[in-house]
Amino acid sequence: MRIVLGKYEMDDDPGRVDRNELWQFLSEQAYWGRWRTRDLVERQLESAWRVVGMYESATGDMIGFARATSDGVGFAYLADVYIVADARGQGLGTELIRTMIDRGPGASFRWALHTSDAHSLYARFGFAQPDRTYLERPGTVPTG
């Protein structure tokens, strides 16, 4: 699925993802997983249920990304969502999330994510604090 947004476009083709750009952002700018090695990021990308990249139309440069894992039937987990700093403030993050969760095969799924920021952005898509039925076992950083 390719969607044009002015001078930007989104695409869910995993082959188009700029793996170097993804690694650079996740390893140097993202607060949420710097413990990952490049190999782990590559493995997560390879096993993703769906990815959506945001690109500058003129250059093809990747300026945003979102990844999801899923059972493919009714549940998905949203991860690694970002827009590079120079492109923020234009609604691109909103469109990236909308495309990932509402414009694709998971539109009717139960979605989950972990984040320490952008709560108001995610709330626009129905994300809220879990209710009393939700339990979670926290993970630890892998040791090898």
Image: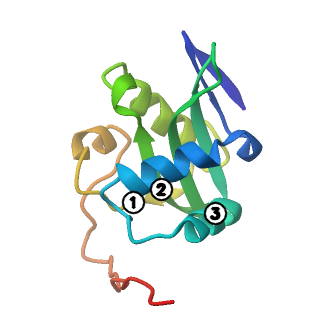
Q: Is residue 74 visible?
A: no
Asked if marks 1 and 3 touch (Cβ < 8 Å), the reply is no
User: What residue sits right under mark 1 in the picture?
Assistant: 113
User: What residue sits right under mark 2 in the picture?
Assistant: 78
Mark carried by residue 42:
3
| Among the 4 quarters of the image, the one containing residue 43 | bottom right
Depth check: give the residue in front, 44 or 77: 44
The local secondary structure at tag 2 comes to: strand
Q: How far is disc 1 from disc 3 in space, using C-alphas?
A: 20 Å
Q: Residue at x 36, y 19 (%)?
A: 90
Asked if marks 2 and 1 touch (Cβ < 8 Å), the reply is yes
Asked if marks 2 and 3 touch (Cβ < 8 Å), the reply is no
Depth check: give the residue in front, 25 or 135: 25
The local secondary structure at tag 1 comes to: loop
x%, y% of residue 4? 62, 17
Which of the marked residues, 1 or 3, is nearer the chain's N terminus?
3
Kind of residue indicated by mark 1? Leu
x%, y% of residue 144? 51, 89
* In the image, farthest residue toward the top: 6
The local secondary structure at tag 3 comes to: helix
| Residue 138 relative to residue 68: left or right | left
Which of the marked residues, 2 or 1, is nearer the chain's N terminus?
2
| Residue 2 relative to residue 141: left or right | right
Kind of residue indicated by mark 2? Leu
